[in-house]
Amino acid sequence: MAVTDGTVVWVGLDKPGRALHPDAEIIELDGAFVAPGFVDPHVHVTALGLKLTGLDLAPAGSLTECLELVRDFAATHPDGVVLGEGWDETRWSEARPPTREEIDAAAPGRQVYLARVDAHSAIASTALLDTVAGITEASGFTRGEPLRGDAHHRVRAAALGALSRAQRDTARQAALDSAAANGVVAVHECAGPEISGADDVRELLDFGHGVEVRAYWGQAVRTADEARTLVKELGVHALGGDLFVDGAIGSHTAWLRAPYADRDTVGTSYLDAEAVAAHVLACTEAGIQTGFHVIGDAAMDAVVTGFGRAVDALGGPAVASRGHRLEHAEMMTPEQITALAAWGVIASVQPGFDAAWGGPDGMYATRLGAERAATLNPFAAMAAAGISLAIGSDAPVTALNPWEALRAAVNHRTPGHQISPRAAFAAATRGAWRAGGVRDGVAGTLVPGAPASYAIWDSRDLVVAAAADTVQRWSTDPRSRVPGLPPLTPDATLPQCLRTVHRGVTIHEA
């Protein structure tokens, strides 16, 4: 492959390449594997960096271990607010979250904010709660339980507001460095007023780094003028991403038609069908891409109804032309899949969710019951219907590791929902560029005319595999000359990134 001024200009055999470019700098790969750089379409950059540089509670295997991590971190970091991410009580023998009293005892007198792994509920210390006026009257505040809904959003804002610009920049550097080290050349920041705030997204867009950032802002609007004004004021690229229609299954805040199996609630609704329709209409008329965070089946009902009203008003081609998207889209009926495909709606999905919480004994089955849980994340049906998939992580919810995400998509815990390695790889490269509005036909590939955005990987073997070992397809025949990929079986060693290059500039080198 030959690159000039950040663009691929030639691909072919070695000898002609050297003859055509006699003065080129030569980079010998020594058997390494080159592939288009990954794009992660759903990331929370500052939150990921805070987890990487601060208190990561994901390793806690029990409530006791979680409290020990909090106690140790508070002791070694005597100043400032204690921010922690990633606890998951469904993996603990105690099967319950920490209490406020336990957090107060682990970090006496300190302001402490500990977000659950899905970031849709949290535990906060008394010292932090005391800084938020009227918190006990806020929606989502229940004594003795994690904060949810508006109460959670207000406390999260208070905790993040206690950070300095230097702390936030340190976190951003760590997060984007980690992205580059995992072969990621671009990320989509899913920001919003209830997530990280306007200052954070402005600072992120002003932050210089080789990893490209596309910013989404999750705030509903009702007119095209309002949409244009908001985009201009914030400097964001689109009005979508984590625009919440509901919450998350693990926090019992995903909006369901029928109650949870383990709690008498149907979750939380933030936007109804009328609000969805108004937002889609406004953004489509303004020429702005939009989308929604939607997980529960009742939330999906509202989204599909809202999109349907926008299609009725503007026509299918007008709506499809904007490349609107849905984040997560975990619970969908076949009829909804067909409708969304017809309207050109893109699905930004996170296979790591299924790897972490799927299966007959996973958190999804506990929260929803086995029958409902088995319907989640139907990647194969979505792809077969023509929905364009973009695979990401929702980091820091799951790790920003594209090969892990691809392996999860290929080895879905529900038989029949998995997709092939090639389809998964396309969804994390070409599909993810498309989800960010890039439709030039070459982004996410390595052909003449494409941006020289690629990663070099240490991978021993390359294989050509179908979606399942029992399926035989022409593309698995070596005579088809279909390029191979690293093996993505559950026991395979995943590739290690040696170098990441974006538009001809090296942004990571091992």
Image: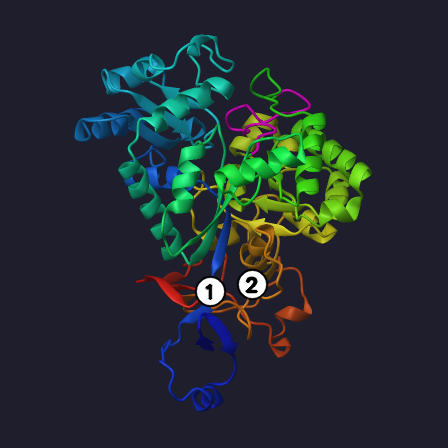
Q: What whole-number distance in Å separates the C-alpha atoms at marks 2 and 1?
A: 8 Å
Tell me which corner region of the image, top left, top right, bottom left or bottom right, holds residue 296.
Answer: top right
Q: Position of residue 335 (x, y in %)?
A: 78, 39
The answer to whether residue 356 shows anywhere in this view is no
Kindly indicate whether the residue at mark 1 contacts the one at mark 2 (C-beta within 8 angstroms). Answer: yes
Q: Residue at x 60, y 17 (%)?
A: 265
Q: Is residue 406 left or right of residue 136?
A: right
Magenta-drawn segment = 243-259
From the viewer's perspective, is residue 463 above or below residue 88? below
**Which residue is labeled 1 in the image?**
453
Q: Which mark is residue 288?
A: none
Q: Position of residue 145 (x, y in %)?
A: 44, 15
Q: Position of residue 437 (x, y in %)?
A: 60, 52
Tell me which corner region of the image, top left, top right, bottom left or bottom right, holds residue 102.
Answer: top left
The amino acid marked with disc number 1 is Ser
Q: What crowding class fits label 2: few (fewer than 14 Cα within 10 Å), some (14-19), or many (20 or more)?
A: many
**Which residue is labeled 2 in the image?**
443
Q: Nearer the viewer, residue 273 or 251?
A: 273
